Amino acid sequence: MTPGTTADSPDHVTLRQVLSYDEDGVLRLLFAPTGQDVEILGVIIGDEGAAHPHEGGIVLATGLPPDLSAASAAVREAARRGAVAVVLREPGGAPMLSEALAAAEECGIALLARAEWADWGDAIALLRSAAAFASVGRGNLMADSAAEGGLAALATSTARQCRGSITVEDTQFRVLAHSATGPDADGVRRTTILGGRVPDWRVAELRRSGLLRALWTSQDVIHRPAEGDSPERLIVAVRTGGEMLGSLWAAADGQRLSPDAPQVLRRAAALAVPHLLRHRLRESGTVRREAHALRGLLHGNGDQRAHLWSLGLSPDAPCAVVVAVRNHPDGPGSDGTLKALAIQATASRSTARVLHEQDQVAVLLPVNDDGDQREALVLAREIDALAAGIPDAAPVWIGVGQTVPSGLEASSSYETALLVVRALRDREARGRDPRPLRHAGPGDVGPTIDALRMLDAARPVWESGEGPVHELIRADLASGGDLVRSLAAYLETAGDIRLAARRLVLHPNTLRYRLRRTRERFGIDLDDPDTRLVLALAVRLSGVV
């Protein structure tokens, strides 16, 4: 296997095996000149240097610029260096795919596209887990069960050989598979299987006893003797390399475990690896697909009905969008704060869908059929209270968009929610409110939203213009912006020199001097209403106030 490949993969896996394993559609086959049984001997990520061979490898074409020649050049270079397949990011656009396909046909190399919702980590995980799945050997009942019947068949076969009950769990102690439960099974096993996960009190008990620490660090089977009503148990971690994927638990069920139960459990753990890798890949894929669908809804991209379907939401349900934006997104604890807000949004709202990216959390919230916005405002208040209670957290502004009759119009509510956030920050920056609001709906800051929309519309006109006001703004901003701030205060107080001076913490005569300079240096008449209007727009568009 060449450098840059997945460390625990077997010597080869076929393209057919990869695609049959890919239940979630991470990769899409575009062209396979020699069929799908071509062997893949390794994974090459991006350009690993001109001298590095790609013999028999599949190349993940990461970091390509978005131009027509880049994709076709990557395909030709991969083929020249001996690769058997190339994966491109999708969508590259029809012309780009056409160019890449032409290159693949010319060079005789397979071509695949990575799904838009997935990332390169998903593609690597898929290839890794498909290779592990292909390595499941044949020749005994347990291996056959693992390969053909999945985790449930593996659990049943293992239980039969151990003479006990088997539970397969992931790292979050969720039950992925289990063998049949006999009449003598203990209460903890019954509760765990019925609830689909180990009860929290049981996890806490295992943590206090040190068993979880042993499970996380041990490479071998852990023995826990019978105690009271709890029967004898054997536990083994399922690992690939140094990474823990989950665990297998064998419990005596009315009889003693077989003498060779530890060896059986070790074999079962090895056979469980590809299944737990698939579980992790599927779970990751679900999260990414939902994030992709929600991002598409909020930004108005793609098939809106398909996005709602991916999120499990009805297109006929009214909804509103709530957005929380954190100031200083790169500050200490910023990501933790936003994660806490995202958890709060979904804690008691199973239908809410949350998108956390960069400096904001956006929540799509289905509301009552009457279109009442109160539910969204209640959520905004909850998030505001939580954010205010986080020690040393930078300010968070929360905006509620208008209720729309369908999730198909979610982008409109999202746009309004972002405008509400801008309005709150704008009002606070200009000292408009003695007690600044940190959350609001569009009805609370309506005039400011209207003003922001007008400013956005006026910006292209202003930026393409010229004249004394433009000269004043450019010159003053280059020297610190004191005159722009003075003009803003003067205009906002309707020409009240004393009030404007108090806001600026200046002597009134100092302000009068600055205003006089605008006339003397730039020839601007502050008594002219059109000039005052242009100045008012200019100082707001300058971003200083």
Image (cartoon, rainbow, N blue to C red):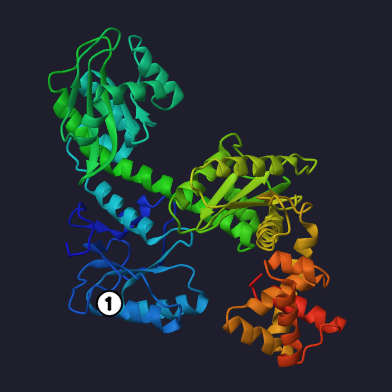
Q: Is residue 150 above or below residue 122?
A: above
Q: Is residue 114 left or right of residue 40?
A: right
Q: Is residue 43 left or right of residue 342?
A: left
Instruction: Note whether residue 257 is visible.
Output: yes
Viewer-nearest residue: 130 or 108:
130
How many other residues sit within 10 Å of disc 1, few (<14), some (14-19) or many (≥20)? many
Q: Position of residue 517 (x, y in %)?
A: 72, 86
Name the residue beneath numbered marker 1: 79
Q: Residue at x 57, y 84 (%)?
A: 478
Viewer-nearest residue: 83 or 474:
474
For the N terminus, the image quarter is bottom left
- The amino acid type, in three-letter code, at marker 1 is Ala
Viewer-nearest residue: 378 or 196:
378
Q: Is residue 15 left or right of residue 386?
A: left
Q: Is residue 381 left or right of residue 159?
A: right
Q: Position of residue 276 (x, y in %)?
A: 32, 41
Q: Is residue 156 above or below residue 370?
A: above
Q: Is residue 418 above or below residue 177?
A: below
Q: Residue at x 78, y 65 (%)?
A: 499
Q: Is residue 310 above or below residue 495?
A: above
Instruction: Note whether residue 199 is visible.
Output: no
Q: Residue at x 51, y 59 (%)?
A: 328
Looking at the rendered structure, the secondary structure element under dot 1 is: helix
Quadrant of residue 60 within the rendered picture? bottom left
